[in-house]
Image (spheres, rainbow, N blue to C red):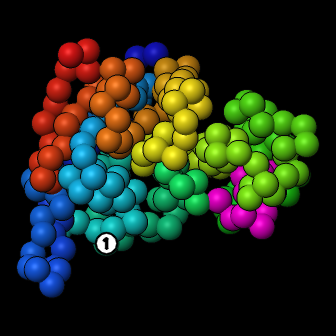
Amino acid sequence: MEASTILEVEGLSKKYETKAGSVTAIDDVSFTAQKGQVTAVVGPSGSGKTTLLYVVGSLERPDEGKIEVVGQDILDQEVDLVKYRRENIGFVFQFFNLIPTLTAIENVMLPMDLAGVPPDEQHARATELLEQMGVGGRLLKSRTNKISGGENQRVAIARALANDPDVILADEPTGNLDTATGQTVIAILSELAHAEGKCVLMVTHDESIRRVSDRAFHMSDGRLSEISNHD
């Protein structure tokens, strides 16, 4: 699928004030990410990569810089950030962030319910997405605290896709999984980019993931540099 720029980040900076002084989490970061591609940001813990993901997803606000998603400046004060997150962004977290007292299908239906999708449509789409992720049958009605980590991450990906977002933001999506399950999750995310045209931005400490990405960046001390994903 032909790539086109969905996400454009320019001059992004973010500092935190701590008891020890000011800490620069993101330091003048610029990059683009494309439709139909997996973009990986690789770096150690504390390098700023999760902060970068949260700023792009509008969960945190930068001190400086520009972020455009599908041509929309999301830092514009007039932008409805709740609507932006609901319609343009799908989040996949390391620890899943599912609601444990809800079933798999209820977790996936929830974002659609918040967006005002009719219940019948919610149920049909959630079922389709979960089955696409390999979660079907009895698992649909299983509470997420009763299923495996790999199954939870599949549910989390289905939830991220519920409102058909342009961008999937994945924060250490394999960090809480065994190697084989992690590889399956990466294959699912790659398929979403390459077959369905999603823009997948993934942050990870796992250097091997960059080799299956289309573009890769290294993050260290808040600064970003592009690297070959085949080295």
Quarter-wise, where is residue 118 in the image? bottom right
Q: Please, is residue 111 above or below residue 135 in the view? A: below
**Percent x, y of residue 172:** 42, 45
* Residue linked to disc 1: 77
Q: Which residues are magenta?
A: 98-109
Q: Nearer the viewer, residue 201 or 125?
A: 201
Is the residue 150 above or below the residue 78 in the image? above
Q: Which residue occupies 72% across, 52% down? A: 108
Q: Is residue 20 above or below residue 78?
A: below
Residue beneath the point at 12% across and 69% down:
23
Q: Quadrant of the C terminus?
A: top left
Query: Where residue 105 sits: x, y (%)?
Result: 80, 51
Residue type for callout 1: Gln
Q: Position of residue 164 (x, y in %)?
A: 60, 43
Give me the residue at 49% from left, 59% from top: 85
Q: Quick one: 230 or 66, which is closer to the camera?
A: 230
Asked if residue 189 lies left or right of residue 132, the reply is left
Q: Could you say which is closer to the camera, residue 123 or residue 146?
A: 146
What x and y, as percent, mark residue 158?
Answer: 66, 43
Residue 103 in the magenta stretch? The answer is yes
In magenta stretch: residue 162: no
Left or right of 191 on screen, residue 111 = right
